[in-house]
Image: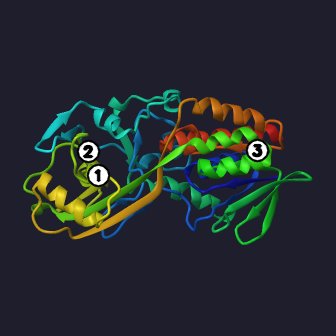
Amino acid sequence: MTVAVAGAGIAGLSAAWELSRARVDAIVLDAGRRPGGVIVSERPEGFVVEGGPDGFLAAELDIQVLAREAGIGARLVDPLVRGSSLWTGERLEPLPEGQAAELLGIQLHDDVEAQHAAPLQQGFRTFATGMADIVEALAGPLVPLIRPAQGVTGLARAVRGWRLSLTGGSTVEAAAVIFALPAWTTARLVVAAGAPGGRHLDDVVYHPSLTVSLAYRAEQLAATPAGTGFVAAGEWSGAVRACSYSSLKYPHRAPAGHVLLRAFLSPVDGDPTTLAHTELASILRIKGVPLWSRVFAWSRGLPRYRPGHAQHVAAVRHELLRLPPLAIAGAGLDGAGVSACVRSGREAAKTVITRLG
């Protein structure tokens, strides 16, 4: 019996990992050419640049348990400093622990995150050379199972299980399927499979994400910033909504004598690097120009959920019980944090394993 996992983001990889632990044959189908989804860590010349999440809430254990199972528990690291600031438009003022994350919307306001709320006051953790550490640890043993550039475009019942249509026109049959895909794609596929309630999954709204990482020599900053970063007050009219002091926040993010900053921008019309540097230079009193910069833009980045979302997801999962084994997982369903995605993927795998007997 083969289980097809659609999606090689952290939820899909976690599902495939759980299946492999149970010695269930699996394949991982993904439209992209690399695993990890929005988790991207680049390591140029001694820097660590994050394209997606740079950490996870320390109080959330799912990703940490998985890391230890994958043999990289020793690579879990804590922040070098604590605390953050509020940029009022005129000065930086200290914020209470956890309030910066709340202002950025990391702890969402709806019933999805409330189910697994973790104390923000405990801070964050990450991995020694970036969040991609966990992706690489999971994907390494799964390499023979991962089929890049083979996204799922359709789903139909087969004699035993499901027939999946793939990018390029090929098909594959599986006894069970796990969708670890964006909510809008999962909605279309599960409705076609015979779960009409899946249309509600398309109500999830994905907000765009735009970040600019900038490298400087340490002497370019008039003073070492305090804490892990700052968020901008709501009345601030600039493009930069927040900034993470990456090389001060976590160890080994920049070579000695250098500073790495990561700016979070509102959608902009101009050049993101120029806007980010200009505003940060004013706020942090930076002289000269950055040594280099790296922009990451996700047109559909962080999901936000409408009221009643958790109930809709539960109803869809109940509908799926009438069909051959089919489970759903991912940030668009069970929470946007990486640890929530790990939990979602592993639970989906356990559901399929149980149904396959």
To which residue does mark 2 refer?
A: 80
Question: Which one is in front in this view, the residue at disc 1 or the one at disc 3?
Answer: 3
- Asked which secondary structure carries label 2, the reply is loop
- Asked which secondary structure carries label 1, the reply is loop
Cα distance between the residues tagged 2 and 3: 43 Å
To which residue does mark 1 refer?
A: 251
Q: Amino acid at mark 3?
A: Leu
Residue 73 rendering spot, x and y as whole percentages: 47, 45
To which residue does mark 3 refer?
A: 326
Image-quadrant location for residue 83: top left
Picture residue at 83% right of the left edge, 44% below the top: 324
Horizontally, residue 116 falls left or right of residue 295, namely right
Mark 3 is surrounded, within 10 Å at the Cα level, by few (under 14), some (14 to 19) or many (20 or more) other residues, namely many
Q: Which mark is residue 215?
A: none
Picture residue at 83% right of the left edge, 51% below the top: 175
Return the disc, 1 or 3, that comes first in the chain's sequence: 1
Horizontally, residue 197 falls left or right of residue 184, namely right
